[in-house]
Each structure stands twice: as structure tokens, then as C-alpha cells.
Image (cartoon, rainbow, N blue to C red):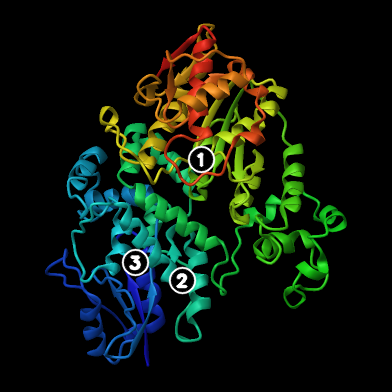
Amino acid sequence: MRKLLVHYHIFKNAGSSVDRLLQTSFQNRWCKFDDYKNPSYKISPNELFDFLNSRPDVLACSSHQARIGKNQNQNKYNIHIFPIIFLRHPIDRTISAYNFEWKIQKKLDRHQGTLAEYLELKFSEEKNSAVENYQTYYLANQFLDKVQSNLIYADDTKYLDYAIDALNDLKCFGLVEHYNESVDNYYSYLHRDFPMFKKIVSKENISQDNSSIDIKLKLKSIRNRFGENIYYHIKSKNIMDIELYYYAKDLFFKNKFAYSTHIPYSLNKSFEDISVEHLLNKSKYFDKDTYMELNKLPISVNPNNHFAQIGFFHKKVFSLQNNYKDLFLEFINIHNSKISTSSNNVVVIHIYYEEYIDEFLTLIEQYPDIDFIFTVVFSITTYSLAKLLVSKYRIFIFENMGRDVYPFLKILPFLFECNYKNVCKLHGKKSIKFVPIEKFNFIKNGDQWRVDLISKLLGNKKIVKENIGLLNEQDISMLIPKKYALPYKEFKGRNKEKVKDLLSKIDIAYHEDFIFSAGTMFWCKMEILRPLLKLDVKKMFEKEGGEIDGTDAHALERIFGMLAKNSDAEVKQI
């Protein structure tokens, strides 16, 4: 069997740096393969194998136009390809493409047009644009019978499913934002089969994009530089790529691949203030003899560092859903005890889909004067939990029931104990099933729903200041984004009897003259929620099967709006 490296060069994804690495490592045994006369041409796996077979001298090859094929190593030439692929945050990638195509490539002192003009041109190239879900389409292509330049599916989510499947098939991949760690990973993965492969961590073109800057800071800088409208326009056109990126990022840092031992320094810092010895002494689960793998454990290692570097990813012990809930609750309680209430305003964010954690953390870091609380479920991975612990926000962990409503009701007594005046309720919405509503046909999917709601409620400092200012007025009880404020009379769904039953338990008369927030995201005065303290929350929520209507959570979605209406203050649409 002949073994070859192929760098699948995705535009603006550190390709020049990778090519330089391969050229330096393999010298004249590295080559490029592209049809330069036809830049839009897609090279099929069979064409690539034909070319590689014609070049017996080659050990490594780079190509912009080649596409990975499903089961491509089952080929007539008995060639085994080790792919090299890098992914990048799509918003950062779009700005990099704009800088390159409309300035650097044309050797101009300034861009040939505005970013808005560039996006208008690029987004007109549906499913064939280099800056619209490009990475998703790129990876999804391998699942087609033949390589296509313009993919067509009635259901766009199929692209994302295919792209994630393709990513899971890879033994290794890189992230531009973590270039050095990626090269280390590839070295560990490849050096036995390719001893000429060198660890070269210098960057070529990506240095022009300040890629050493943390991605959160870069996204914040992009939003500040180009404005909210353009930022969210790019985001809305790259929903699948964003989801793919955060899925890939989790894979990258979950220690999924045996060769990868790179844990971010922040994880080491996350537990410096938590006494692991306390857990060693008190918890039967965190036990040195059963937890620490002695063959990996240097003598006299600090158990704190060992936990952050190795134990946090040790599946035998740290499965939150099985026998170790007490351990993690102990950690979280220690963590929460060190955080004090510092504001009259609190934002409660429920996390079920972990890929949205970074999105939320990037958003909320601009609001130091507001308290933030995360509610999560026991299925959360230890790596995602670590990211929240590092961020120094309060965390509450629950069974997966009642969607985002059950956790909110469970922490409601705590919110009143903290004497918060106003609360914003958010969550990472990702509706797979959605029944189109003719009157509201602007709602295309759960991702758009989430982005729209969050941008209106917590989009930037100006919006938040205005929202809190409105709530501090006496005659306003709740704020709901205008497009998502639905009249209960028209949108009772299958919830009328459940609404009546729940209202009877909190001594409120049933009526239908109110609006509610579709998606259960809003700002409101804390005081209007006090009647909900009467509910026996744990007995309320039955097991769900992904229903789109008719559950306790859907009934409560409407009751929040009724409570606001009953307060004799305005429910304002923003």
C-alpha cells in the first residue's frame, strides 16, 4: 500500500502555512494539483488518484480543488490518503476573504469596495459562494455520487449532517485559531508513517489576519468595526458553518484522538482555586487509586494539575450522567460559593446544545455590570463545563426535562433570594421540527429564531441599556422582540387545558387577552414571576418526545406572558 499526504486546501484556512510546512518537510516530493485555467472546477477523488498514480515520486500533495470522497481509500491503485484539513470560524474567515480578494490579491492600498458591497456580491452566488456555509458544503460534497460545484437539497440541514459525518470520519483535523496545537496533533498522528513531516509552527498568510488573537476578541473587534447589521448578516448566512465550527472545536479539545494531549492553559487555571484534596478526602468517586492512571502519573504530581490535564477527560470517572453527579455538584457548589451578586439585573441562559456556549460567552463578556447564570443538563461534557467554570459565572445543573423552562423555574427561588430586579431569559434554541406559521413565515429555523431573539434582547450595549431603562419604568412589565410576540387567542395550540390547570395552581383566573414570546426569551420584572413560586415544579414535567406543542413547557411559555399582562403594566414589543 502506498501512503500519501493530501492537503485539502480550503480557501482562507491557513493553506499557505500548511503548504509551506509540507514543502519544507518533503521538498521535491511535494506537489500541487489544480486546474489553474478553470478555478471553479472541482477535482473528483478518482481524478486525484489518477494524478497521484502518475506521480510515484510524490509523498505529499496540496489542492484547492480536490474534494474528499467517501471511502476514498478503497481505490484501484491501493493508495491510502492521509488528509490534512483546517477549519476556521466563518465570520473571521469572511473578513479574511474580503481583505484578500478585494485588497491584497489586487495589490491595492485600500479595499476596492465596502464589506457590504463585497457581501452583496458573494451572497448572490447561492450555494457556490466562498463565504456562505462554504466549509459545510465542502465537507458535505464527499457524500454525493459525484463532485458538484452547486449542491441542491430541499432540506439544508442535510448538508450539515453530511459535513459532521465527514468530520467524524477524519482521524485528525486542524483549526486555524489553534494552528500550533493543530500542527502538534498532525505531527503526533503522522510522524510514524511520514518521518519527513516536520513540526513547523510559523504562519504564512494567516499572520496578516492577526490569527494569534483570541477568537472571542476577534469577533468582538469585527462587530465593533463593521457594526451589528453586517455582523449578524454574515452570521445569518453562515448558520451551518458556525454550528460545524463549534462542533469541530469541541472535537478538537475533547481529547478525542489518542495522539492529542493539548489541553488549553485556561483549563489548568480553572481549578487552581478549587481544592482537589477536598474532593479526594470526601468523595468516594475522586479516588487516587481508581482515578489516576499510574502509568501516566509522574511521581509527586500535583493532583490539581493532573485533574485539569488528564482526569477531566477520563471517561471512566467523569461521566456526569452516570454515578458521578455528586462529584460535579460538589465542584459546582464550590465554584458558585465564590461568586457574589453584584447587579440588580440578571441574565439566565440555558444550555442544552453545547456548541452555543462559546457564542454566549463571547456575547456576554461585554456586560460586566450584569450578573449571568447558566443552567445546564447532566449530559454536558466535562470540557464544556470547564469552559463555564473558567468564565466565573454561576452554574446550575439539572436533569434533562422541561426544556429551558424547568431549570428556570427551579432557580427562581434563588433569583428572588438575590433580590434581582429584572431578569432576561435566554437559551440556545435549535428547533429541528418546526411547523411554519403563515403569518410568521420569516421564521425559517431555530437558528434564525435564536439569533433574532438574542440580538433584540442582548445584542449590544446600547440595546441592553435601552431594555433595562424601559423595565425600570413603572408601567412596563415585560419586553418581547416584536416579530416573536404572538397573541394567545390565535396561538393557543394544544395548550389551553394545560394553561388552565397551571393557572388554577397559582390562583389566577384564565383569560385569553395577552401576548407571549414565541421561543420563551424575554426581559421582565422579577416581581411578575412571584406567583410561579407556588408551583411544585418537580411534579409538573412529564417525559417529552420532542413534541413541538402541548407540553408543560409550551403551556408555561404562554403563562409568562399572562403574568406580565396581569401586572397591570405594559408588555412592550421591541
Quarter holding residue 115 = top left
How far is mark 2 from mark 1, CA to CA? 27 Å
**Is the residue 476 above or below the residue 97 in the image?**
above
Image coordinates of residue 416 in percent, x first then y, are: 68, 22
The structure residue drawn at horizontal position 82% and vertical position 54%, both measured from the top left corner, is 279
Quarter holding residue 150 = bottom left
Q: Which residue is mark 3?
A: 16
How far is mark 3 from mark 2, CA to CA? 19 Å
What kind of element bears circle 1? helix
Q: Are circles 3 and 1 on residues that touch, CB within 8 Å?
A: no
Residue density around tag 1, few if under 14, some if 14–19, many if 20 or more, within 10 Å: some
The structure residue drawn at horizontal position 24% and vertical position 44%, both measured from the top left corner, is 111
Image quarter (top left, top right, bottom left or bottom right) of the C terminus:
top left
Q: Amino acid at mark 3?
A: Ser
**Is the residue 419 above or below the residue 69 in the image?**
above
Q: Amino acid at mark 2?
A: Cys
Image coordinates of residue 350 in percent, x first then y, are: 55, 39
Closer to the chain start, of discs 3 and 1, is 3
Residue density around tag 2, few if under 14, some if 14–19, many if 20 or more, within 10 Å: many
Q: Which residue is mark 2?
A: 172
Does residue 287 appear to the left or right of 82 in the view shown?
A: right
Closer to the chain start, of discs 3 and 2, is 3
Considering depth in this image, is 541 or 390 the residue closer to the camera? 541
Q: Amino acid at mark 1?
A: Phe
What kind of element bears circle 2? loop
Q: Which residue is mark 1?
A: 360
